[in-house]
């Protein structure tokens, strides 16, 4: 039997890959920021509509407070569906590649978001409109589970020595950027349209914008992710999808710790974005436009704080910074929520101080224990950790905070935030113990 050899690309007359340049962390950072900003814009468009629109449009059969609680319950569905989406899309990634997975996920995410803009109201379709809203929210969460592209992990692995905290901060910038754009867009629509027109069709416009941004983000990310240079870099760093079951079996301790370590910042995330808008809208006479502008201003302070978190983490260590921030969030939880009943001045103090704390903590919350994953499990393990952190730390935060505040006073929402801070401190301690072993 004669042996055969596989012909080379040169023998077949095919072009060979010759890297033109070394990929810099800055190039990876661009893809990360574009991707995260588009995802968070989707997130905040839905969140703002959950307060200003959905209680009146889909739950008019109950009082405004109950309608908002129902709206927040639907809001949480996406966080429940997201881990399931990761499970399915990791299989697609292994079978067909990262580019196919991202294309399906981002078109599905954009399609689910845009479809919400076409939903009929309860007065038109009855409970069917509510079930459709819940179905599309589940679709958003499921598709979001497929948007993990590994660029954040790649960025962390390629960060220069001594600047890992700086590059860990970059993916998190998408959150305040997305909030600023979404808040200003809704403020503009509310200001320029009569209330009846806004509730009829004006609120739908941001959902169309979200779909357009998703399409732009998709092509921007594909231009990076599917190039031969980046494919080779993913392979050389062993950032490839593996079995979710195998990853959980081998890395369950790291996944659990990684899900609880950022809990303080994730709980604070909704305490200074979604929850205060609902409280101000329901229990004060302030126009929503004013508070949306306060949110955008506070988010700008959050951007500055996130940038500072990169410098501080590189100087003092990421775990140390997260621990100090968790203590700061615990202190914040004891007095700050009551500021929401202090008029415009109190709201500004609450939002700016909250966003500064959020920027410092959230800026370093991504992948705080990702280095503890075995190399072959880092890509899949990081995705699962992120999904579970959002589920435990943020998914039910607006619902829980509003319910507790209404029934037990604003101080009770501070108690919810305190529990997140304690969970972070405990997880960081366990992470230190495992690392020392």
Image (cartoon, helix red, strand yellow):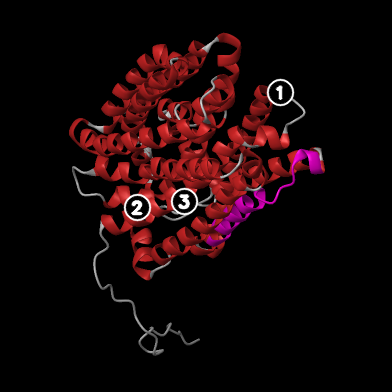
**Which of marks 2 and 1 precedes in the sequence?**
1
Q: Residue at x 58, y 50 (%)?
A: 207
Q: Evaluate whether residue 2 shows in this view.
A: yes
- Could you classify mark 1 by the number of other residues whose Cα lies within 10 Å: few (under 14), some (14-19), or many (20 or more)? few
Mark 3 and mark 2 in contact? Answer it, CB < 8 Å.
no
> What is the total number of numbered labels drawn onto the structure image?
3
Q: Secondary structure at mark 1?
A: loop
Q: Earlier in the sequence, mark 1 or mark 3?
A: 3
**Main secondary structure along the magenta-highlighted residues:** helix
- Pointer 3: residues within 10 angstroms few (<14), some, or many (20+)? many
Q: Which residue is mark 1?
A: 63
- Pick the front one: 200 or 218: 200
Q: Which residues are magenta?
A: 103-124
**Mark nearer the viewer, 1 or 2:** 1
Q: Percent position (x, y) of residue 323?
A: 31, 23
Residue ID for mark 3: 38
Q: Nearer the viewer, residue 274 or 223?
A: 274
Task: Give the vertical position of 25 relative to 20 (above or below).
Answer: above
Mark nearest the camera among 3 and 2 is 3
The residue under label 2 is 154
- Label 3: element kind: helix
């Amino acid at each position: 039997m004669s042996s055969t050899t596989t012909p080379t690309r040169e023998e077949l007359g095919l072009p060979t890959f010759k890297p033109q340049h070394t990929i810099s962390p800055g190039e990876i950072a661009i893809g990360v920021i574009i991707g995260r900003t588009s995802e968070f814009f989707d997130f905040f468009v839905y969140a703002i509509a959950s307060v200003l629109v959905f209680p009146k449009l889909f739950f008019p059969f109950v009082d405004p407070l109950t309608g908002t609680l129902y709206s927040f319950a639907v809001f949480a569905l996406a966080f429940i569906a997201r881990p399931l989406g990761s499970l399915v899309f990791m299989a697609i990634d292994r079978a067909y590649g990262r580019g196919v997975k991202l294309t399906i996920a981002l078109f599905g995410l954009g399609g689910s978001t845009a479809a919400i803009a076409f939903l009929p109201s309860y007065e038109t379709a009855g409970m069917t409109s509510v079930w459709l809203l819940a179905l599309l929210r589940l679709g958003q969460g499921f598709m979001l589970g497929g948007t993990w592209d590994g660029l954040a992990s790649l960025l962390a692995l390629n960060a220069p020595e001594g600047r890992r905290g700086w590059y860990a901060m970059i993916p998190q910038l998408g959150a305040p950027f997305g909030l600023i754009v979404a808040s200003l867009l809704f403020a503009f629509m509310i200001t320029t349209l009569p209330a009846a027109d806004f509730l009829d069709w004006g609120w739908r416009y941001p959902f169309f914008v979200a779909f357009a941004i998703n399409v732009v983000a998709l092509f921007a990310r594909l231009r990076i992710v599917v190039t031969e240079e980046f494919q080779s870099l993913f392979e050389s760093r062993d950032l490839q999808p593996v079995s979710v079951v195998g990853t959980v079996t081998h890395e369950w301790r790291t996944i659990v710790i990684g899900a609880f370590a950022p809990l303080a910042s994730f709980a604070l995330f909704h305490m200074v974005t979604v929850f205060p808008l609902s409280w101000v809208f329901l229990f004060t006479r302030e126009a929503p436009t004013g508070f949306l502008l306060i949110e955008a201003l506070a988010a700008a302070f959050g951007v500055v704080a996130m940038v500072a978190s990169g410098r501080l983490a590189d100087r003092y260590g990421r775990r140390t910074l997260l621990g100090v921030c968790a203590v700061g969030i615990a202190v914040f939880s004891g007095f700050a929520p009551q500021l929401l009943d202090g008029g415009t001045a109190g709201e500004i103090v609450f939002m700016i101080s909250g966003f500064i704390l959020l920027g410092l903590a959230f800026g370093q919350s991504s992948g705080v224990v990702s280095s503890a994953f075995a190399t072959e499990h880092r890509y899949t393990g990081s995705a699962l950790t992120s999904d579970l952190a959002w589920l435990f730390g943020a998914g039910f935060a607006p619902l829980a905070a509003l319910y507790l505040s209404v029934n037990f006073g604003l101080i009770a929402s501070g108690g919810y935030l305190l529990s997140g801070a304690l969970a972070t401190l405990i997880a960081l301690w366990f992470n230190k113990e495992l690392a020392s072993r």
